């Protein structure tokens, strides 16, 4: 069986970042397995700009951002298998995949980096009653049709959910001549970035209806309209507020789900909140030698953060193939009041060089709140934050010295203190 | 002289297609005329509980009872010949109170009268052994060994395909708008054309009353009884091993919890009499009811794992005995297979035999074909092959090495095959029903654009012409730059006009 030092599953920004980092750190026997026809992943259809402000200190489009890495992959002559689907990974790091050239084959890895990204939540998962006509699609699919295939999926559009892809598509479809009648958001706040709300909706006078949802879809063959209504504090529709909007398309931007079917088959433990693997400070999953980074681990807002995470995963994978297992995690990391989740979910202080970055999301919008890290009753950190919102991921850096004060049995808890 | 068919069947649901296949065993010219764009694309054959009933429920002596039990027995051979997955899971009617236990005895007796084999009344412990995840409140159950699960549209497609292989013809997008008896044959008119046939079989489901009344036979009516369902992710499939019913009511066999042959969990149906034969929407109330009532049987399922919801319309006859309406009408040569509601799917192969005999009694000459082939060309299911088989296949045809649907692992080769087969797929839903591309967790978000591309290429049409389910259900509405140009041209024209 062919053996690679590192097998990277997924050729989007996470996989590309990991491959380039591993190569530059001297591990050259690596391969990227990508199911699509090209590298770059979802970035290839994100033709708007705003990528790379942290990573390259300039504003790039999605394909430009990806190309910087693809150029390096080509320059370094890193192995890439395109149009190749991984069917299975095993806990002893054997990868089974298929493509039309080689058929079904198995390869062995010193370490595996999971970089499969995420998918969009479809209609069924949010239970909108009504008919099942053509013209209901996710924002990402709409983006692919418009930007990659050159077709408009509709002319009069309502968007449900204010995730970033939905906001971007509101602008994109408007620029292509379609009429975006409204963006309807169930929550009292948007789950997208503030800059996208300003640049994609406000600049084009597209109404954002917060605390509203679509309660029925109409139309037999093609969507003919939707009924929307305001929701109460329990997110239940208030029927008296129902109104009909005629449209031929309903675009859904109602959440992203990390794609972990392969991870599950390998017996990797998942975090029910993030939908991604539970990882330690090395971004190693519950199966030794299998690492995760990017949207398969947690859904990010910015690709720059994905790249940073991919670097860490690559360095951890290298350390694993050189030094073997890392030793047990000794501190549990928990999400307390006001915080939905924290990644990593467990750490081993001994493996941290100087400091470690935790990423998390709040459950609600908080203004001028304190972001707090505690171990038992002891405060490890208190930071004032002007604004916390579920649409924007929070970064917290903790130094090794601070973490040494943590009580191993109590673990550490991240929480929000208001007022 | 226009072509003369021996038998024209109206409706390409499971009943119409089963009749077509049964008749294709004989030297006959057969035509199936369907309003929808595909087999099992419009009516109850597409949207039902996906089960084979054992037959303890119908009134003893009724056609429903007789044809249910006979039909159930026929499915093993049929599914083997037609290469359709079937699982004899058995079913439970679970009683959750002593009151309901009494009903079980009654059902058991009825089952015995109907000739159902493998029925037994079992205690709570035995129920829990068969169904570990059923609620602890269960008291006892009626266990029916012969009940099973099957994909209803998958089966209907297979039957139609085999009928076509054996010479039966199909026309789609052809709604029958008039039927006239012209001496010893019928003239059947659609929006597009006319067909001549010596015999007409009415298998038009919910519209079988309209068809019957159109020809001037003794009128009857059929109304829709709506049932709403939810399908949950495969990771919920473990919660039921058999079809779990509750004790039936006047409105039907109640809301069930059942695995599907593909491993998902099915919940439903509700039961509500309505008027509109085209009402196929789900409702908030209906879905909530299905969930609430199903929780009485199994409360562990996670509603957030719902993949999709749908509504099915049962073709409930408004006759006194509520039985199937099967037989030659008072218009000679016009034969009804009408008002086929549950257990219609289970009964379908037996209905086909019965219709054959009725046609024979009505004077149709049945001469067996020596070259009738009961077997459908096997379907390639990539996920079910061994790696050796996969490699052999990919070597012969590299399209089998390209995975198009990630969630259900469906290859390009499989999609092309079902488009090219007899009675092949012509739409996104047609592909989905045949190979499950788009049927999984992401509901076609990733594979949708790829399948559109493959359909356009195979059918030699523009992607703009590709539909979800025929008629005006186009997926795409315009080319991007062209649409802007057209809009700009309109504005210009208006300006020029206003300036003039």
Image: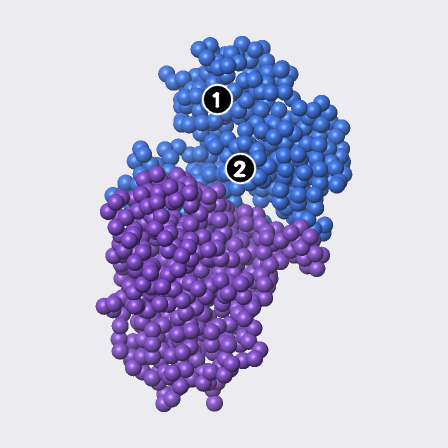
Chain colours: A blue, B purple
Quadrant for the N terminus of chain A, please: top right
The residue singled out by tag 1 in the image is A334
Nearest the eye: A49 or B427: B427
Rendering coords of residue A304 (x, y %): 59, 30
Residue B208 visible (yes or no): no
Rendering coords of residue B478 (x, y %): 50, 57
User: Does B1 sit left or right of A47 as displayed?
Assistant: left
User: The residue tagged with tag 1: helix, strand or loop?
Assistant: strand
User: Does A235 sit left or right of A16 as displayed?
Assistant: left
Identify whether B306 is placed above or below B376.
above
Residue A404 visible (yes or no): yes
Nearest the eye: B206 or A40: B206
Q: Quadrant of residue A233?
A: top left
Q: Residue at x 33, y 84 (%)?
A: B332
Q: Residue at x 44, y 34 (%)?
A: A191
Q: Residues within 10 Å of mark 2 (few under 14, many from 20)?
A: many
The reply to the same-chain question for discs 2 and 1 is yes
Q: Chain letter of disc 2? A: A
Q: Chain letter of disc 1? A: A
User: The residue tagged with tag 2: helix, strand or loop?
Assistant: strand
Q: Residue at x 43, y 80 (%)?
A: B7
Q: Residue at x 30, y 68 (%)?
A: B62
Q: Residues within 10 Å of mark 1 (few under 14, many from 20)?
A: many
Measure how far apart labels 2 and 1 are at the Cα level.
20 Å
Rendering coords of residue A207 (x, y %): 38, 41
Rendering coords of residue A187 (x, y %): 38, 35
Q: Earlier in the sequence, mark 2 or mark 1?
A: 2
The residue singled out by tag 2 in the image is A258
Give the mark toward the camera: 2 or 1. Answer: 1
Q: Give the label on residue A78, or none.
A: none
Identify whether A347 is placed above or below B490.
above
Quadrant for the C terminus of chain A, please: top left
């Amino acid at each position: 069986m062919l053996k690679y030092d590192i097998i990277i599953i997924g050729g989007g920004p996470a996989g590309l970042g990991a491959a380039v980092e591993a190569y530059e750190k001297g591990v050259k026997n690596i391969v990227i397995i990508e199911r699509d026809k090209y590298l770059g992943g979802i970035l290839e259809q994100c033709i708007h700009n705003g990528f790379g402000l942290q990573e390259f200190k300039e504003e790039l489009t999605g394909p430009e951002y990806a190309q910087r890495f693809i150029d390096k992959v080509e320059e370094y002559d890193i192995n890439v298998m395109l149009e190749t689907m991984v069917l299975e990974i095993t806990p002893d790091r054997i990868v089974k995949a298929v493509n039309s050239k080689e058929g079904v084959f198995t390869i062995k890895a010193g370490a595996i980096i999971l970089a499969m990204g995420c998918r969009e939540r479809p209609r069924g998962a949010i239970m909108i009653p009504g008919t099942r006509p053509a013209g209901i699609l996710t924002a990402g699919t709409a983006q692919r049709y418009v930007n990659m295939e050159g077709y408009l999926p509709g002319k009069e559009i309502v968007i449900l959910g204010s995730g970033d892809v939905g906001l971007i598509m509101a602008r994109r479809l408007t620029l292509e001549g379609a009429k975006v009648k409204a963006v309807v958001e169930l929550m009292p706040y948007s789950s997208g970035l503030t800059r996208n709300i300003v640049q994609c909706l406000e600049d084009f006078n597209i109404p954002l209806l917060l605390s509203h949802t679509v309660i029925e879809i109409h139309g037999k063959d093609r969507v003919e309209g939707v009924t929307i209504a305001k929701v109460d504090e329990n997110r239940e529709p208030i029927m008296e507020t129902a109104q009909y909007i005629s449209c031929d398309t309903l675009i859904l931007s109602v959440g992203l789900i990390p794609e972990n079917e392969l991870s599950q088959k390998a017996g990797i433990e998942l975090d029910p909140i993030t939908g991604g693997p539970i990882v330690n400070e090395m971004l190693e999953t519950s199966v030794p030698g299998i690492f995760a980074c990017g949207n398969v681990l947690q859904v990010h807002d910015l690709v720059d953060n994905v790249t940073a995470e991919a670097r860490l995963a690559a360095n951890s994978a290298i350390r694993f193939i050189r030094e073997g297992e890392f030793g047990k995690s000794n501190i549990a990391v928990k999400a307390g009041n006001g915080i939905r989740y924290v990644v990593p979910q467990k750490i081993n202080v001994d493996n941290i060089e100087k400091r470690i970055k935790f990423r998390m999301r709040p459950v609600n919008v908080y203004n001028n709140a304190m972001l707090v890290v505690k171990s038992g009753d002891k405060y490890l950190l208190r930071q004032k934050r002007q604004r916390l919102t579920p649409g924007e991921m929070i970064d917290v850096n903790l130094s090794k010295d601070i973490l040494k004060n943590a009580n191993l049995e109590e673990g550490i808890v991240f929480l929000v203190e208001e007022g | 002289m226009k072509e003369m068919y021996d038998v024209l069947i109206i409706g390409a649901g499971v009943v119409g297609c089963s009749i077509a296949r049964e008749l294709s065993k004989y030297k006959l010219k057969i035509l199936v005329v369907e309003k929808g764009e595909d087999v099992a694309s419009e009516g109850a054959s597409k949207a039902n509980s996906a089960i084979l009933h054992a037959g303890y429920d119908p009134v003893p002596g009724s056609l429903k009872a007789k044809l249910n039990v006979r039909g159930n027995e026929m499915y093993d051979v049929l599914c083997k010949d037609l290469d359709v997955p079937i699982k004899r899971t058995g079913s439970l009617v679970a009683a959750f109170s002593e009151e309901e236990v009494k009903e079980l005895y009654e059902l058991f007796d009825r089952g015995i009268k109907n000739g159902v084999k493998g029925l037994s009344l079992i205690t709570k412990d035995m129920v829990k052994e068969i169904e570990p995840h059923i609620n602890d409140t269960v008291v006892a159950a009626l266990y029916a060994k012969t009940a099973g699960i099957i994909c209803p549209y998958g089966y209907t497609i297979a039957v139609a395909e085999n009928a076509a292989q054996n010479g039966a013809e199909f026309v789609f997008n052809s709604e029958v708008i008039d039927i006239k008896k012209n001496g010893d044959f019928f003239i059947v008119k659609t929006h597009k054309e006319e067909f001549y046939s010596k015999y007409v079989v009415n298998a038009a489901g919910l519209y079988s009353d309209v068809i019957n009344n159109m020809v001037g036979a003794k009128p009857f009516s059929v109304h829709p009884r709506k049932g709403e369902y939810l399908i949950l992710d495969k990771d919920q499939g473990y919660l039921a091993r058999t079809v779990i019913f509750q004790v039936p009511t006047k409105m039907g066999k109640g809301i069930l919890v059942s695995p599907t042959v593909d491993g998902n969990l099915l919940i439903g149906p509700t039961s509500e009499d309505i008027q509109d034969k085209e009402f196929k929407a789900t409702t908030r109330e209906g879905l909530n009811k299905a969930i609430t009532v199903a929780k009485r049987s199994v409360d562990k399922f996670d509603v957030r794992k719902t993949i999709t919801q749908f509504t099915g319309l049962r073709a409930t006859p408004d006759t006194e005995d509520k039985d199937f309406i099967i037989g030659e009408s008072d218009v000679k040569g016009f034969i009804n297979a009408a008002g086929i509601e549950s257990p219609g799917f289970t009964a379908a192969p037996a209905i086909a035999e019965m219709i054959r005999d009725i046609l024979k009694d009505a004077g149709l000459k049945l001469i067996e074909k020596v070259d009738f082939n009961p077997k459908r060309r096997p379907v390639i299911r990539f996920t079910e092959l061994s790696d050796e088989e996969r490699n052999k296949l990919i070597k012969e045809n590299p399209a089998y090495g390209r995975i198009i649907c990630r969630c259900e692992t469906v290859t390009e080769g499989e999609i092309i095959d079902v488009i090219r087969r007899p009675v092949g797929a012509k739409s996104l839903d047609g592909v989905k029903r045949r190979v499950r591309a788009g049927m999984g967790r992401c509901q076609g978000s990733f594979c949708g654009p790829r399948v559109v591309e493959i359909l356009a290429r195979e059918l030699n049409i523009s992607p703009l012409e590709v539909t979800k389910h025929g008629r005006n259900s186009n997926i795409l509405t315009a080319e991007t730059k062209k649409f802007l140009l057209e809009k700009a041209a309109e504005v210009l024209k208006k300006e020029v006009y206003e300036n003039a």
